[in-house]
Image (cartoon, grey):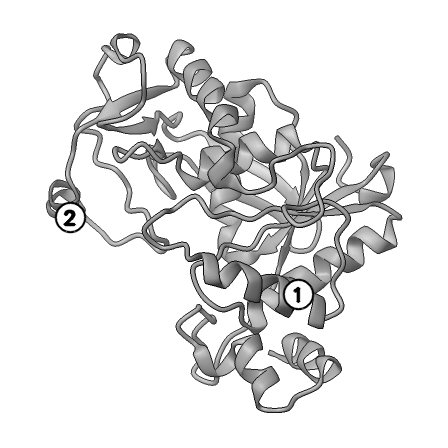
Amino acid sequence: MTPEAENIPMYRGRIAPSPTGLLHLGHARTFLVAAERARKFDGTLLLRNEDLDPDRCRPEFVSVMYEDLRWLGIRWTEGPDCGGSFVPYSQSERRDFYLPAWRQLRDGGFIYPCTCSRKDLALAASAPNDDDEPIYPGKCSLRTDAHEFERPAGVNWRFRVPDSEAIEFEDLHLGPQCFIAGRDFGDFVVWRRDDVPAYQLAVVADDNAMQVTEVVRGADLLKSTARQLLLYRALGYEPPLFYHCDLVRDQSGVRLAKRHDALSIQRLRENGLRAEQVRAMAFRG
């Protein structure tokens, strides 16, 4: 597939906020870019509510999320609030879409059950990793009993990465990217022991089912793209194109997170800033 978005028929983009806190300037930049690219290519922009994690997602953040996005001038034509051809648009309602993908990976020998605890992983970690999932030491990777599980609940399910393979892709904004499986990231979780599909699997299944042709998201997810490309290949899906936005950072150089309440869109609105001012701030950061 060519890396030129102009060659994509029927452009379909998406914004995919997670209601775990208030949206901040970094989200504003990414979602504004996604909306602009959909307009540029006369395409469709959908909104997907990524509310998978029951421990962290809060219903009260969903309505604020819609309000902030509309205030910024972002419009979508498919989503939980307006429907569309690929309902439902909230991940918490899409379990039936994720189970077939899990079964396909299980039957293909791509995943294995893992019973390691967080303490086990912390003790086994030889070096810190630069994202939220440490490189797995491989204790359960030789298990061959995956087919004995009819359901994914009760254990973590990890994708067995092809050790030392270079995962390469062309990012539409940041250019050529390359990550080495087993070095830059290890066997990653696709389904959690508490019976919740993990981000990597859910995003791939949803973007494929919703016929997304280009994924716009932050540069902090470049390594997730490498992981997800392995899932696309294992599942036989055609991957979309990727556009990773530069990150917005605070004055100390730390990338913004939802704990940066002072730079949340909601707080900036309360302080009397206009939407055009916040849009400008998002691209200055």
Q: Label 2 neighbourhood size at 10 Å, few (<14), some (14-19), many (20+)?
A: few
Q: Nearer the viewer, mark 2 or mark 1?
A: 1
Image vertical order of residue 190 relative to residue 244, above or below: above
Q: Secondary structure at mark 1?
A: helix
Where residue 283 sits, quadrant-wise, is: bottom right
Residue 159 in percent (x, y) is at: 37, 27
Residue 12 at x, y percent in the picture: 76, 41
Q: In the rendered image of this protein, does residue 281 appear above or below residue 166?
A: below
Task: Decide: is 226 above or below 105.
Answer: below
Q: Quadrant of the C terminus?
A: bottom right
* 128, 198: nearer the viewer: 198
Residue at point 63%, 91% (across, down): 272
Q: Position of residue 188 (x, y in %)?
A: 35, 35
Residue for point 74% across, 63% down: 74
- Amino acid carrying label 1: it is Leu
Write down the residue under mark 1. Answer: 69
Q: Answer left or right for 170 relative to 260.
A: right
Residue toward you, 89 or 120? 89
- Residue that label 2 marks: 122
Which SS class for mark 2?
Answer: helix
Q: Is residue 11 visible?
A: yes
Task: Inspect the image, locate mark 2, and give the three-letter code of the amino acid beneath it.
Answer: Ala
Give the image quarter of residue 56: bottom left
Q: Alpha-carbon distance for marks 2 and 1?
A: 38 Å
- Identify the residue at horizontal 63%, vertical 67% (top origin): 67
Residue at 72 percent of width and 61 percent of height:
33
**Res 227 visible:** no
Image quarter in which the N terminus is found: top right
